[in-house]
């Protein structure tokens, strides 16, 4: 297959909505225009690479056919933000690798789809009006993304533009001249970027501050005062200019730092959200940063994107657990990958138990609710008729602990163990559920083993943790069952549970399913854990597959199984938890929450 055919087919695949995630080949690039506006035919003017002494490409010259090179990220749960990247090069060359492809890959790493724009470099030899050629390409790139947002899973309100050096001038021009009618648009799609990122940008065309090479390439050597003013973008900022992130080095001798400073001051004057990072050193053209004080700008940009709600904050995994008999309270451990876990607060307790007959805090279950609070329930005693409850904004400062007497209506209730909470997003309510033994009920599974305990799963519903529905039976699987944990799974729910039967011995984890949170739930599956005693299952999806943790309580260690296309794989040998970890629950939290916890 020829390169031209390959390029055509990949471009077609992209327009048909076929994922090209992971493609970094330039053959994935597709033509921006079906007919380039204002083009002047010139068969002798052909695109060419700029090479260094070793023959490595450092840029592209003489661009006549503008393209977009896609770097898409997979995210089926939400629409993605997207960025058009304009490489620099003084409007005479495009540093497409350092200031294009490498940057696109970085955007992918933080969950943003990126499109490298190979825009036309202004030339009277191929353009009727070279001053508008690059802007035409930038405007059309933004419109192409909005027109194809559904196919590429893009959020049409989160389309940004980034530019380096002269590419920064183009990005700033697109951010201030988005209403300019520089070519015919029939569908009325907006060319205004929702945010812009300008990295050591050329902003002004004014003498004494501009980059002369960029100015002459775009405007010519004899530009009029009006034309210079028109493309001095600090003069065009108004209240509708998109929020902007700026980066520059004080020792930039090619493009003076005043370009960014003046643009920032114009944004500030017009009350446009803006952030600027001016570094002590770095010179010009440092890209993502390789040395000097400028190397952290990409991390600062990521924080800015999170703060402006363009991307979600990165999350980490947190695990709540108890130690010993639960007398000292809540312990927390965290993980970046779900496998290697590290204790917080030197494995000391974050919350001392205060309620219940025995004032214990066993089996702590924490979820984040629809109200933004973290809600926790726990086992307070071996023999009580209720459970503990508290809430927190940050997992550090907790509300007054409450005792919820969820089984007091059953006078013979022996216990109320391992409570958990699941939030029902559809009905905006919480289901709290637990295991209890009521003597005389379910005699067909009554046994003298395990001190005569014969559990079933019960539940109550609350919307506000102030009033609760009457307790009801949730799950009767036909055997002694404890430690249920229920999670949303597709359109329905999955319940992980422990079969507590001792004769004949089970002591394993099984699953059941339901279309509704409150059931009815299906017959329990065959065991998904191995030939060992397991309890306290808690699960989370990583890369679309369930990872289930459980307490191998006779072995005094934690185990795990991973969902695969062929069933369940034991990955206990791949995980590590703090010594003494007992029955807990896993949840995902923003990294900012973890950073606060680490200060404790």
Image (cartoon, rainbow, N blue to C red):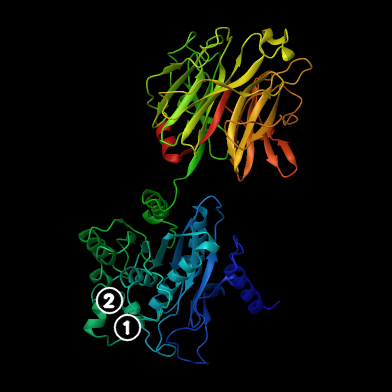
Which residue is at the far left? Answer: 269
152 lies above or below 496: below
Which residue is tagged 2?
A: 205
Q: How many angstroms separate mark 1 from mark 2 (CA)? A: 9 Å
Residue 69 in sight in this render = yes
Count of picture labels: 2
- Residue 107: percent from left, percent from top: 48, 57
Which residue is tagged 1?
A: 219
- Residue 222: percent from left, percent from top: 27, 88
* Residue depicted at x 62% and y 69%: 13
Nearer to the camera, 139 or 405: 405
Q: In which quadrant is the N terminus drawn?
A: bottom right
- Where residue 15 is drawn, which disc sits there? none
- Category of crowding for the residue at label 1, using alpha-carbon neighbours closer than 10 angstroms: few (below 14), some (14–19), many (at least 20): many
Label 1 vs 2, first from the N-terminus = 2
Q: Secondary structure at mark 2?
A: loop
Image marks 1 and 2: residues in contact by CB distance under 8 Å: yes
Question: Residue 207's quadrant in the figure?
Answer: bottom left
Q: Secondary structure at mark 1?
A: helix
Q: In which quadrant is the C terminus drawn?
A: top left
* Residue depicted at x 74% and y 14%: 444
* Residue depicted at x 49% and y 55%: 79
Residue 285 in sight in this render = no
- Residue 23: percent from left, percent from top: 60, 64
Q: Is residue 457 left or right of residue 510?
A: left
- Residue 193: percent from left, percent from top: 38, 65
* Residue depicted at x 58% and y 7%: 412
Q: Is residue 481 left or right of residue 92?
A: right
385 lies above or below 311: above
């Amino acid at each position: 297959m020829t390169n031209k055919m390959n390029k055509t087919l990949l471009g077609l695949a992209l327009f048909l909505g076929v994922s090209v995630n992971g493609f970094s080949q330039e053959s994935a690039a597709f033509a921006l225009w079906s007919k380039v506006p204002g083009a002047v035919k010139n068969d002798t003017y052909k695109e060419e690479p700029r090479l260094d002494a070793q023959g490595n490409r450092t840029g592209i010259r003489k661009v006549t056919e503008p393209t977009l090179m896609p770097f898409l990220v997979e995210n089926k749960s939400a629409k993605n933000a997207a960025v058009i990247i304009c490489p620099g090069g003084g409007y005479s060359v495009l540093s497409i690798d350092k200031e294009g492809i490498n940057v696109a890959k970085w955007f992918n790493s933080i969950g943003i789809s990126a499109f490298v724009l190979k825009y036309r470099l202004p030339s009277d030899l191929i353009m009727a009006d070279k001053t508008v050629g690059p802007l035409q390409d930038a405007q059309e790139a933004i419109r192409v993304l909005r027109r194809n947002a559904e196919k590429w899973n893009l959020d049409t309100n989160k389309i940004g533009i980034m530019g380096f050096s002269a590419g920064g001038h183009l990005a700033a021009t697109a951010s201030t001249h988005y209403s300019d009618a520089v070519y015919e648009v029939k569908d009325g799609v907006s060319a205004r970027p929702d945010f812009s990122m300008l990295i050591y940008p050329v902003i002004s065309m004014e003498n004494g501050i501009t980059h002369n090479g960029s100015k002459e390439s775009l405007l010519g050597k004899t530009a009029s005062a009006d034309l210079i003013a028109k493309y001095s973008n600090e003069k065009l900022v108004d209240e509708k200019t998109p929020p902007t992130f700026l980066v520059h080095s004080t020792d930039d001798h090619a493009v003076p730092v005043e370009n960014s400073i003046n643009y920032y001051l114009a944004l500030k004057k017009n009350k446009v959200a803006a952030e600027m990072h001016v570094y002590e050193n770095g010179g010009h053209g440092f890209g993502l940063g390789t040395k000097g004080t400028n190397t952290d700008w990409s991390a600062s940009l990521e924080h800015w994107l999170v703060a402006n709600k363009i991307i979600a904050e990165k999350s980490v995994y947190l695990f709540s657990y108890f130690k010993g008999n639960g007398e000292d309270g809540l312990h927390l451990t965290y993980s970046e990958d779900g496998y290697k876990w590290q204790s917080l607060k030197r494995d000391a307790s974050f919350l001392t138990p205060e309620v219940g007959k025995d004032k214990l805090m066993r089996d702590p279950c924490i979820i984040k609710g629809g109200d933004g609070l973290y809600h926790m329930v726990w086992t307070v005693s071996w023999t009580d008729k209720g459970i503990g409850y508290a809430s927190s904004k940050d997992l550090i400062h907790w509300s007054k602990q409450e005792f919820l007497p969820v089984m007091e209506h059953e006078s013979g209730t022996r216990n109320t163990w391992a409570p958990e909470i699941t939030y029902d997003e559809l009905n905006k309510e919480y289901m709290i559920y637990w295991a209890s033994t009521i003597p005389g009920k379910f005699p067909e599974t009554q046994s003298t083993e395990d001190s005569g305990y014969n559990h079933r799963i019960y539940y109550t519903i609350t919307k506000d943790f102030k009033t609760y529905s009457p307790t009801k039976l949730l799950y009767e699987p036909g055997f002694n069952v404890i430690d249920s944990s229920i999670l949303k799974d597709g359109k329905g729910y999955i319940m992980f549970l422990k079969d507590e039967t001792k004769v004949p011995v089970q002591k394993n984890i099984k699953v059941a399913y339901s279309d509704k949170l409150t059931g009815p739930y299906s017959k329990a599956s065959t065991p998904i854990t191995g030939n060992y005693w397991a309890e306290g299952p808690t699960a989370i999806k990583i890369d679309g597959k369930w990872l289930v943790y459980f307490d191998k309580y006779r072995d005094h260690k934690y185990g795990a199984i991973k969902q695969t296309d062929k069933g369940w794989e034991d990955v206990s040998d791949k995980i590590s938890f703090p010594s003494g970890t007992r029955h807990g629950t896993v949840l995902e939290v923003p990294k900012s929450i973890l950073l606060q916890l680490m200060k404790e």
